Image (spheres, rainbow, N blue to C red):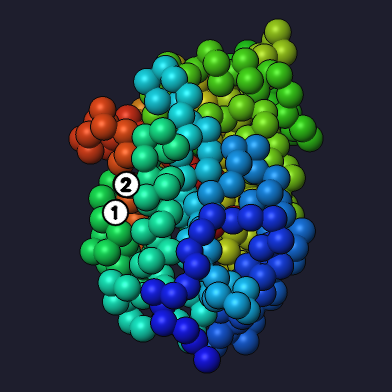
Amino acid sequence: MPVPSEELVVRAYREGDAQKILDLFNEVFAEGDADFHARSMDIWRWEFLDNPAGMQVVVAEEPGSGRIVAQYACLPARAHLRGRIVSIGQGIDSIVHREYRRGLKRQGAFLRTAQYYFDHFGVPARNAWGYGFPNQRAYGIGVKLLKYVPIAAPVPTLFRNLFQHAHDAEVGAGRAHDGEIVEVQRFDARADRFWTRLATAYPMAIRRDAAYLNWRYLDNPLARYVAFAFVERGGEYRGIAIVRPHWTGPPILAVQEWFVDPHAPEVTGALLAHVTRFARATGQHRIELWVPEAHPQFRAVRDNGFGVEPSLFNLCIKIYEPTLDVEWVKANWYWTIGDSDVF
């Protein structure tokens, strides 16, 4: 029997919670989904314990039994904000046991758990901003109850349907370049130096250094990612593209990470041409990529034969850093598919 929600113990994660959280996650997400595959402890450990930026997990626990019945979690990342490094949190895996779902009442288990998170992590000393990519169902709840501010609603998808094109000569056409594209098995100090060189061109973005790229993509047990880098003659990076075939199931190649020198159109063309060849070679029917419309790469990708259409996702923000305002965020925040939890 559930206890009154006001009697639940709401607190931050502590050692020993992992299996209880995982049990709750698998029970909740299995409801009404015959195709659900239970998440393993290896996946949970990678997502939360191994994250180089730390952990931001809040739970609600039944007194006495110790059963965890709700969670509000964010996936933290180190980000660049106007020349300094800050922490941010992406909202993921908000779950409540069915016994404690009383709609969305003010004193319900979900809102109590979420409020604890915002009280402790939603402050400038802990996070500069929080964000999420809610689908249509979660979007209204997030805006109304969690005060999410829409930034891109919906997120635009840059796409190329390979079945509509007999050839791909327009992708990268006329863009001579002095370098080569290599597959990256592991990111090293070159990725760190590349980020440092380009950081001023990305005043608001997750820090795409080696530690982040290796953890987010190459160590990810949920999916197979393939990483490419445009390498100039001296061996340094000028562009990074990380792709995932069969994204969300269909033969769609998602360009999960797209980090390119914005002043090097030849690198953009060369990487897109390489990604397009890879998509055809692996039997993909479509390529999808997200970058903000305000960023120069949006037009650069369109100029290489990609169309644009709305996605099913919305990007929203909760601002904790008092110097940030929404219009500046819309003009300067850089994000990709990899910034989401649609792994």
Residues at circles 1 and 2 in contact by the CB criterion of under 8 Å: yes
Residue toward you, 336 or 232: 336
- Tell me the quarter of the picture where residue 311 sits: bottom left
Q: Is residue 166 above or below residue 18?
A: above
User: Callout 2, which amino acid?
Assistant: Lys
**Dot 2 lies on which element?**
strand
Within the image, what quadrant is residue 292 found in?
A: top left
Q: Is residue 277 above or below residue 197?
A: below
Camera sees residue 165: no
- Residue found at x 60% / y 77%: 64
Q: Quadrant of the C terminus?
A: bottom right
Residue 249 seen in the figure: yes
- Left or right of 11: which side holds 53? right
In the rendering, at what x and y percent does residue 9 appear?
50, 67
Which residue is label 2 attached to? 318
Secondary structure at badge 1 equals: loop
Estimate the x, y position of residue 226 in percent, counting from the top left.
70, 43
Q: Provide residue 50's location: percent of width, then percent of height.
A: 70, 45
Q: Which mark is residue 148?
A: 1
